[in-house]
Image (cartoon, rainbow, N blue to C red):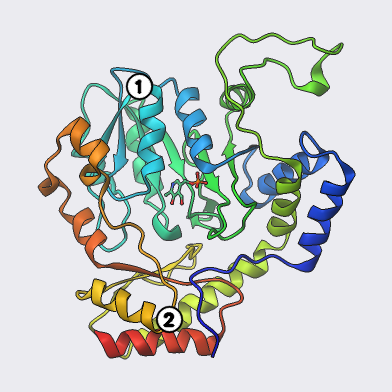
Amino acid sequence: MRDIKFSIPNISKQDINLVGKIIKSGWLTHGKYTSLFEHEIKKFTKAKFAVSVSSCTAGLHISCLASDFKKGDEVIVPAQTHTATAHAIEYTGATPIFADVEYPSGNMSLDKIKDKITKKTKGVILVHMAGYPCEMDKIVRFCKKRKIKVLEDCAHALGTYFKGIHAGNFGLSGSFSFYPTKQITTGEGGVVITNNEKFYKKIKKFKAFGIDKDIKDRKKQGDYDVKSIGYNYRMTDFQAALGYRQIINYHKNLKARHLIAKRYIKNFSKTDKIIHMPYSATSSFFVFQIFCKNRDKILKKLKKKKIGVSVHYTNPLPKMSYYKKKYKLDIKDFRNSHKYGKLNISLPVYPKLKKQEIDKICGEIIKLV
Ligand SMILES: Cc1ncc(COP(=O)(O)O)c(C=O)c1O
């Protein structure tokens, strides 16, 4: 049996042909595939607006700017997430306020948010961990009443639904990642979705230097103004072409992910020593997470057997040196995040993963617990 990789991007010959065609054309950015990709993202998520960006981190950054987060504001964020979620708040000068997550979902619940609310709370960023949806109805209702802005970090959530609505449509925006291990990839890249036109216009401006007019809206060449600071967070057209090919075929990919998750669950039903994420028809199964007491020993053994797995994530953010030094937080406040970080293993989920490979991964882990 071949070595089992943690992730294999789902890139077809047709995808490569299209990317090659765009590169050969010489029209590498601002091209038609950027619009086509954004259009297909809107179709898939049913959002009114979509803006492609150079990464999910960039999307989160400009979402925080468009939310007007600034020095003196507090924005609640899960303690157990990728550092990009909290960094996006830091970039604006606002303060990330870490809240514990639930175990084993890894998601921040309304109760955990309530624990951290103060007069300075201006926003909340939710993360749908491993593609498992947060309880968006309760959270949005609570935040709306208090004029607290909700943003969604959807880095794991392409194909995640809550009560029939795609993730990213609940808050002011949802930021998605197309890093190579994600469900679809553009190499590096991301997209921001929103249903708020004013917010959309702000996002577009922050993404491209603060320039107030798209090329197509300019009466003559060079006819634009710069009314605010902005960045260059554009995605190239050949990346967008790859994303376009991948999103139009994503339904098949998502179906395969659900079948893989079901097989993991069936195999792990043979033991009660492994806690795993529950099966949910509304999850995107970015990865399949399990929780084991002797996690580090298992990681070592799986590496020896050439079985690729990952960890999302080990240290909660309040334990990372940058945040630890700056905010001097007590790790005891983040009990579940700590436990989650110590026990989780992310198992591979991708369409090219074979049934025998899933069985081998499960068999080896069951032997080790
Ligand atoms: C939860 C979460 N948010 C944000 C990011 C950052 O995404 P990107 O690498 O596209 O900037 C990641 C990256 O994996 C992530 O896992």
Q: Secondary structure at mark 2?
A: helix
Q: Is residue 318 above or below residue 179?
A: above
C-beta proximity under 8 Å, tags 2 and 1: no
Residue at 36%, 71% (x, y): give it.
278
On screen, residue 275 versus residue 68, left or right, reads left
Q: Specify the quadrant that holds the N terminus.
A: bottom right
Q: Earlier in the sequence, mark 2 or mark 1?
A: 1
Residue type highlighted by circle 1: Gly
Q: Residue furthest front?
A: 304
Q: Is residue 7 above or below residue 61?
A: below
Q: Determine which residue is flagged by label 2.
A: 264
Q: Determine which residue is flagged by label 1.
A: 93
Residue at 38%, 77% (x, y): give it.
303
Q: Give the x, y percent position of residue 237.
A: 76, 42
Q: Secondary structure at mark 1?
A: loop
Q: Specify the quadrant that holds the C terminus.
A: bottom left
Q: Give the x, y percent position of residue 355.
A: 54, 87
Q: Label 2: how many residues lie within 10 Å, few (<14), some (14-19) or many (20+)?
A: many
